[in-house]
Image: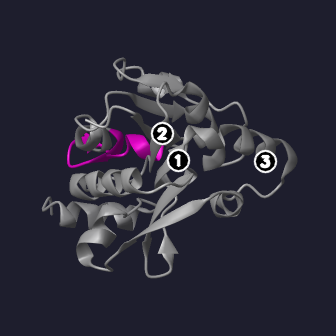
Amino acid sequence: MARNISGVILAGGANMRFNGITKANIVIGGKAIIFRIIDTIRNIFDEIIIVTNSPEEFKEYTNFKLVSDKFLNVGPLGGIHAALKASSKEVLFVFAGDMPLLNRTFILKQIEYYQSIKCDVLIPRINRNIEPLHAIYNVSVSEILEDYLGLEKEYAVREFIKRLNVSYMELEDSQETRKAFMNVNSQNDILIVEKLLGIT
């Protein structure tokens, strides 16, 4: 159990590509993506925060902390900010809410690596590709992020982290890593996930 780290799920909002269904609530193989994420991380973190601006969609998750963005329409940075403010821990492990195939072993290795170094943010990197929504953020960046959201007009996570002390965890480009970091962005992605899960 990572007792000084909160697990954070950025559950997001409605997505028009899925008829307005929030991606975290898309059901694959009889289970919503958010349920699959929680199932993977529940025994790692004793505090799990779900960030959503539609809390009524997640009423059944009463065992977890539901929070909403203070800064609206700024993408994932708004969710990260909300979680930083809500966390009772020193560190957040942030996950995108559309990652149905998270790998517990990778998560534990990332935590172990973070605890062995000193940085504001630890992000996995495969070749030149980074995944800032499978990343560990120290709550010390909260004020920097709040200032950034109040002043800047570029809300990409990749732009914000240029202001921080960022370390990267290098991972092999393999089917296993690609699977663990896969996002569901289309109907075709759902079919791919079903195939990987052996559902079809």
Label 3, secondary structure: give it. Answer: helix
Tell me which amino acid carries mark 2.
Val
Point out the stretch of residues depicted in magenta: 22-34
Please tell me in which quadrant of the rendered image residue 40 appears.
top left
Question: Disc 2 to disc 1, how far (Cα)?
Answer: 6 Å
| Residue 25: in magenta span | yes
* The C terminus - image quarter: bottom left
Tell me which amino acid carries mark 1.
Tyr
Question: Disc 3 to disc 1, how far (Cα)?
Answer: 16 Å
Say whether disc 2 or disc 1 marks the residue closer to the N-terminus. Answer: 2
Q: Residues within 10 Å of mark 3 (few under 14, many from 20)?
A: some
In the rendered image, which residue does mark 3 sit on?
148
Labels 3, 2: front one: 2
In the rendered image, which residue does mark 1 sit on?
137
| Residue 125: in magenta span | no
Say whether disc 3 or disc 2 marks the residue closer to the N-terminus. Answer: 2
* The N terminus - image quarter: top left
Contact (Cβ within 8 Å) of mark 2 with mark 1: yes
Label 1, secondary structure: give it. Answer: strand
Q: Is residue 170 above or below residue 94?
A: below
In the rendered image, which residue does mark 2 sit on?
91
Please tell me in which quadrant of the rendered image residue 44 appears.
top left
> Residue 198 appears at what percent x and percent y?
12, 62
Q: Is residue 61 above or below residue 140?
A: above
